[in-house]
Image: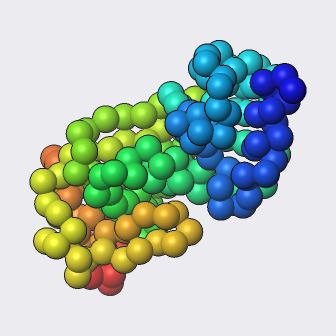
Amino acid sequence: MQPIKQLEHVLAKLADRDHYLFAATDLQGALPGHGDLPVLLSRAAKAGLLKRVCRGLYLYPRIEHPSGLLLFHAAARLRADEFNYISLESALSDAGAISQMPINAITLMSSGRSNVIRCGDFGRIEFVHTIRGPDDLANQLTYDADCHLWRASVALALRDMRATHRSLELIDWEAVHELV
């Protein structure tokens, strides 16, 4: 069987509504003996079998995925070995404390290094480094099962905004006082 057909077969078996993003390392084990996986993935993307989200992460477009959650799911996959939580502008916007909704951009605090991941037409993911761990923040985080990530309380997101010297100009302070 040709490698692209083999990949198509593997993806059809593995993919579902919760598993539609694949890292190159995920597919390596499913395609044993295929030496040049990056070339195969590039061909699959050109053929429309996969869509490249960002370096090393691919979307299987034949599975309907939850609308508006792709960047959150990608962030969870990209930094699965780190402590991450939705915070800063994303958390405040979702809570209604910022009047403008960030378009195709999410912000997270991470125990990993700070970095902005550009995801082409899908948007961008901004990771901002924090030295605080889950034990320090447990009472201010809730798990967002839809996003597959922890989410900061409004008070924690505001504290993160100040600690990282982010602009506070867009914050609706009346809404914050109601939420905190």
What number of labels is visible? 0
Whether residue 122 can be seen here:
no
Choose between 96 and 21: the one closer to the eye: 21
- Residue appearing at x 41%, y 74% in the figure: 143
Name the outermost residue toward the front: 33
Q: What percent of the width, then of the height, locates residue 2?
A: 84, 22
Residue 32 image-quadrant placement:
top right
Above or below, 52 against 23 in this view is above
Q: Residue at x 80, y 33 (%)?
A: 6
Q: Nearer the viewer, residue 63 or 105?
A: 63
| Between 57 and 25, the one nearer to me in the picture | 25
Q: Is residue 74 visible?
A: yes
Q: What colouring style does the render use?
A: rainbow
* Quadrant of the snapshot with the C terminus: bottom left
Question: Where in the figure is residue 91, as x and y percent of width and height?
Answer: 38, 63
Residue 151 vertical placement versus 10 (above, below): below
Please identify the quarter of the rendering in which residue 104 is found: top right
Q: Residue at x 25, y 39 (%)?
A: 114
Q: Please give left or right for residue 162 compared with residue 141 in the image.
A: left
Q: Is residue 177 above or below residue 170?
A: below
Q: Is residue 84 left or right of residue 136?
A: right
Decide which of 95, 115 is in the foreground and name it: 115
Residue 28 % position (x, y): 59, 34
Residue 129, position in %: x, y? 21, 46
Tell whether 106 sits left or right of 175. right
Residue at 56% across, 69% down: 146
Quarter in which the N terminus is drawn: top right
